[in-house]
Structure formats: C-alpha cells, structure tokens
Amino acid sequence: MAAAAAGGPGPGGGGRRGARAAATNILAQLRHGQLSGCGLTRGAQITEALLKERDKQAKWNGIPLLLQKLYEHSHPNSDFSQCQSILKEISPLLSMEAMAFVTEDRKAAQESTFPNTYTFDLFGGVDLLVEILMRPTLITQKKKQKISDDLIKDCLSILYNTCICTEGVTRRLAERNDFVLFLFTLMTNKKTFLQTATLIEDILGVKKEMIQLDDIPNLASLVSSFDQQQLANFCRILAVTISELDTGSDDKHTLLAKNAQQKKNLGPSRAEINQATLLNIPGFIERLCKLATRKVSETTGTSSFLQELEEWYTWLDNALVLDALMRVANEEAEQSSTESSDESGLANTSTRTQLPQSMKIMHEIMYKLEVLYVLCVLLMGRQRNQVHKMIAEFKLIPGLNNLFDKLIWRKHSASALVLHGHNQNCDCSPDITLKIQFLRLLQSFSDHHENKYLLLNSQELNELSAISHKANIPEVDAVVNTDRSLVCDGKRGLLTRLLQVMKKEPAESSFRFWQARAVESFLRGTTSYADQMFLLKRGLLEHILYCIVDSECKSRDVLQSYFDLLGELMKFNIDAFKRFNKYINTDEKFQIFLNQINSSLVDSNMLVRCITLSLDRFENQSDAKVAEVLSECRLLSYMSQMSMRMSFLFRLINIIHVQTLTQENVSCLNTSLVILMLARRKEKLPFYLRTLQQMEYTEKYPGFILNNFHSLLRFWQQHYLNKDKDSTCLENSSCISFTYWKETVSILLSPDRTSPCAIVSYIDEAYMDIDRDFSEE
C-alpha cells in the first residue's frame, strides 16, 4: 500500500509530477479513511520515510512528521514532557495563517486555502490534541496524569487557529458533546481561561443543538470561582446558551409558522431551561449588576489586563478591537515618552506598564456589553418578574444612571474609540454597540412593568404625584408603591437623561430608533395621564413632530418608532392634541404629516388606532375644553370624517393576509378590529360592512376584502384565544375589555347569512371563499 501511495517509477510516475501525484494520493486516502473509517485514518499510520520523501514537494512544512513525533510522545503512559517542544514548532506555522484571517486581509484570506491548518487537520492533528487534553479524564488509575498549563494553552490555541482557518473543524468539535462539556472544566484554571473561553464560544456558535447548562459539571462553583473579569467574558458564552436559536429575523417569521412551532414544542425550550439554571446560581444576578454598574476607576489592576492583551487577537472574535486598543496605547505611550526626559529610564518604563485611560474605558465597555446583553435576555424571559425584583434590589438602574454621562453617553475623542477601518458613527463601534444595548435594556426593563418608575428620581416621582393631584385624578398605584431607596439619585433620573440626549441626536443617527423604543416602553400598558404629561412638559411631542414633519424622516424603522411613541404619548390626552394642533399649524405641515402616515400604514397604524380611540372618547365627553379642541384640531377633524375612517379600514385589511402576518404587521389587524368595535358600540357595524362591500365593487373585485378579512379573523381566534396568549396588552392599549374583542370577532364570523353583523352576509355566494384551511396553504 505504501509503495502504491509512493507512486514509484513507471509510466508517468517519475519526477515532480509523480511526487505531486503521490502526495495527492496520500491526502485522498487519508480523507477517505477519515470519512469511511477504513484504511488510513491518521498520519501516524504512514511511514516516516514516506513522509520525509514527500514533505518538501507537497509543501507540508514538516507538519505530518511533527504530528507523528507528537503521537509517539503522547501515549497513555507518557509524561508529555516532549509534547510541549513539538507543539512550539507547530504553533507558529498555524498562527500565521490565523492572523492573516483576522486582520485586514480577512476577505482575501477567506477566499484562499490554508495549507498548514488543513494539513494539520488532515493528518489527525485536531483529534490528537483532543485526545491529549482529555487523557486525564479517561484514565482510571489513582494517580492521574498531570498536563501542564502551558501545554493546555498551546493545545487550545492551535485548535482555535485550526477552527478559524479550516472549514468543518469547528462543527466536528461541536458534535463531540463530551469534549464541549470537558472544556468548561478547564475554565476553573485562570491561566487557561482565556484560550478555553475563546474556543468554547467558537464551538457553541456552530453547534446545532444548544447545550444544557445543567450538564456542565459543578456549574455553580465554576461561576463562583470566576473573578469579575472572567465573569464578564463568560457572559459572552452564556449569551449563546440563553438566546433562542436564530433562524432568521424575528419580525419576518410568519405567525402561522410560529404557532405551528409552538404546538410542536410543548415544554420550555433549552434556552428557557438555561435561563432558569442561571437564576438558581447564588449571587449570579447580583454580580452581573455590580459588573454593569462599576466605574472605570474600580476596575482591576493594569498588569492582568496587559497580560490578557498579549493573546487578545484570539479573544472572542475581537481582533479589530485589539487593533484599536493597541493603536491608542502606542499613541498615548509615544506622547508620554516625548514629554518625559530622555535621561529618565524610569519614565519610559512606566509608559509601557501603565494602562492608558482610553484603553481602560474600552476594556470596560467590552465587558459591559456582554453583561447588559445577558441581563436583557433574562428580562425578556419566563422568569421576568424574578429578574426584575433582583435587579431592582441590586440597584442596577441607579448604577447605570451614575454611569450615563461618563461612560454610556460620554463625549469621546475621535481617535480614542474608532476601530481601524471604521468611522466614528459605524454601528460596529463598541461605543455605539454599548449605547444600543443599554437602550434595549431600558426598553425591556420598562415594558409593561411597574418597576419602570425606578427610572426616575425622587423629585420626578413627586412631580408625577403633583400632576395627578392637579388633574384631580388618583395617583397610579405603582408610583405610590415605588421604593424610594431604589430609584435614581442625582439631579435627573435615567428617563430624563435619555430625553435630553434624544433631542440632541442628529437626524441621521442610528440611535433614534432605539431611543424612541425605550421611551415608548415607559408609556406602554394602561394609559397614564401623569406619565404622558411628564414627557409632554419636557417637549417630547414637539421633538417627534419636528423629526416627522420638519426633517421629513425617511427611515422606515425610525418613522415606525416615532409613530408608535406618538400614539402612546397622545392617547386619550386632550392636552397632547392641543399641543399637536399648535405645532402643526398650517395646512402644508398637516399634509406632510398625513403623507408620512399614508406612506406606510404598517408603520403608522398604531397612531391611527390611538387617534380613533381618542376621538371616540372625546366625542362622548361634555367638557368645554374637549369640545374646543375637537372643533379646532386638524387631526381629530380629519379622523371624524367617515370617508377617512373607511379608507383606513379598507387599506388596513388589504395590506395583510394570513400567510404574511408577522409580529410586526399583526397590529394592522387589531387596528381594523378597533375601528369596527367602536362602530359596533354605536350600532353602525352593518353600515361599515356594507360600505366595505361597496368599495369592493368600486374596485371591480367583489369579495376580495371581506373574504380576506374573514380568514384573518379566523386566524385571530386561533392566535389570541390560545391559553398561553396574554390578552392584557390588547385590553390595556385600547381600554376595551378582551371579552368585547372576542364577542365582536364571533359576531363578525357568524355563519348566519341573515345576520346584519356577519361578514358572510356581505359576500355574494358566487364570490364566497371563506372555508380554506389557511394553516396548510
């Protein structure tokens, strides 16, 4: 077999071409053996003479021979003493390729091959290193083999470099559950922590099945052994284990597909089980809150971080960050050394060991990013109330408030934090990512939860109480019950600080969307007049209208977030409509506003719902102030026209279909239902249905709207009458009981063709198409 592989002299077998063919034959046989389990499966099975003969022509750089030596010196009874020196020879050959991959030439590198890492894997290097690492766990002798920390570090670094460069290696390692769980045990050793964390994250990123944290040996003691720096790095790994596996953008998933998936998954998902596991670790949330809120001056010493930087090119996918850090360090070190005397050797030494402030800040930003992400995911999980209670108790919100100006929304120099190859406003910047993660956390924290008032300070809470007293309405229970010892301190609370930066944000800023979402979440839930007035007094409505009308915002995402916020801010609030009319004081401005609404009803439908609900309430009030605003407000006058409401209703039903319903556009269905519920209250439901029928005929397509609406309502019943579905959001946002929602849908879906409120009564039999099973389409 060896002779055949060698490709001896014969026709076409001589010279260089024969050597190349032989090398190719060896590679082919190795690859075939690894796939089939027959024949050659690792390089150690090939004779040393053959490997030496073919090494130079095949450009293997001696890797197969080194692996053969490594195999011989790593047998079960060896002391591994020779292994380290062999790995020291192999390591530089692979690390150069890995460095090429993660630097500026990344794209070019991805398009090329990596002969050293490929050769290393092909000749069994990856499997051999896994064997070496796991050897102590597989031996039953009383005296376990001891592998040195340096040997473990070298094995892990080589494995990581091979994973980076050679396709399929990471997936192969991910399939070995025993190895993945074993890696976690290596994290107890501070000397090997960084390399282990790096490799684990890479493996978990491609693993098909999420690991179960419960399977990790002694997880609680492992986490408690971490210092704060290690815990922050560990959060990056945890992020993969507690987030639902991403199979595309959440908003783009159809609700049909989601509902079908939920029926298959009857129990909690692995991500949810992992979240519960983390919450059961004593002190875990408290330590995360401390990490998230610690100041830069409280961070650990310089030396440990500088030591960590030596290998940061492999640290959790942040090569570009290292590039930025090292550039800043060099700039500041050069500046310091030129300012000091050339005769002072001590001064020059200190510039090399003292960590620049800008690097400290970058370091802290990278850590806080990971911690805030984990807290955010836990806040949105099944144990939300438990998490809320913990992070309130551990004063996360006041702590973030104290960091707001100096770290989260600080003014930074252009040179300090811009990554190489990027600009200051690039979304890849850690500075920008931290801001977005912070805003997402605020959004999750405030959304439909009474703890949202912790975003204010004591004076601002007193202001809410004063607003309620002045309006002669009861105070909100949650305001009264808020523990004043847990709220923000200082002159301003977090919400007020957020409003201030929001109003200063440039028109093209990527933060506008997230800022609006965070403020809107504070208003969500049962409408609070005091909350609305608190924000109105700070000029929020005028700012939103400026962005929508005067700057004529073009971003669909930003527009949607502004419309949603405007809807929550104005709902049932006559003062808000008065302010609106004062700002939109010309027909030209009002037309621009309407054009923005009509440009995409999917984006603006929540505002349409707010105006419709508010108009209905105002019309039923006998207050003189309300009557005055009703007669003067352009927006209310516009919506009071039956033709306008019918136009909105027709278009809302027409732009959605059961097969295309998503979490983003299902609100259009609920807004159309709100319009019809209000009509039903006034006994005008038959008139609305008849008008829809007439509009169909005008469009020369009888039945196309009403058949579609019938299917949508059948889906609505399936979706919202599910026992796991929370209906309080629909009730709170509309101030209409869920019972009335259900009754209205049942009446509309009645099969009785003689009923004046049934959709089928308005579809001619010739155009009837209501019995289709949309779940199978």
Image (cartoon, rainbow, N blue to C red):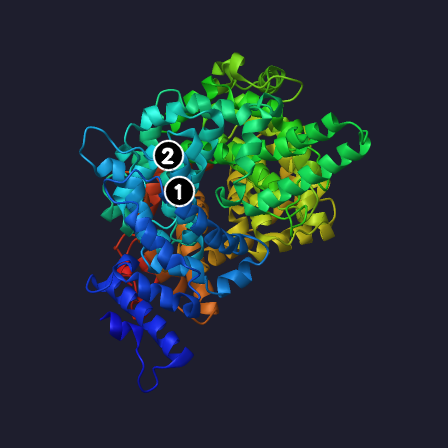
Q: Earlier in the sequence, mark 1 or mark 2?
A: 1
- SS type, badge 1: helix
* Location of the C terminus (image quadrant): bottom left
* Pointer 1 local density, CA inside 10 Å: few below 14, some 14–19, many at least 20: some
Residue closest to the eye, 667 or 393 = 393
Res 752 → quadrant: bottom left
Residue 562 picture location, percent across and down = 59, 44
Q: Amino acid at mark 1?
A: Gln
Relative to residue 47, is residue 602 depicted above or below? above
| Label 1 to label 2: alpha-carbon separation | 9 Å
Residue closest to the eye, 730 or 208 = 208
Point 44% across, 63% down: residue: 115
Q: Is residue 359 left or right of residue 97?
A: right
Report which residue position mark 2 lands on: 148
Residue closest to the eye, 745 or 479 = 479
Residue closest to the eye, 667 or 44 = 44
Residue 152 picture location, percent across and down = 38, 39
Q: Are marks 1 and 2 in contact (CB under 8 Å)?
A: yes
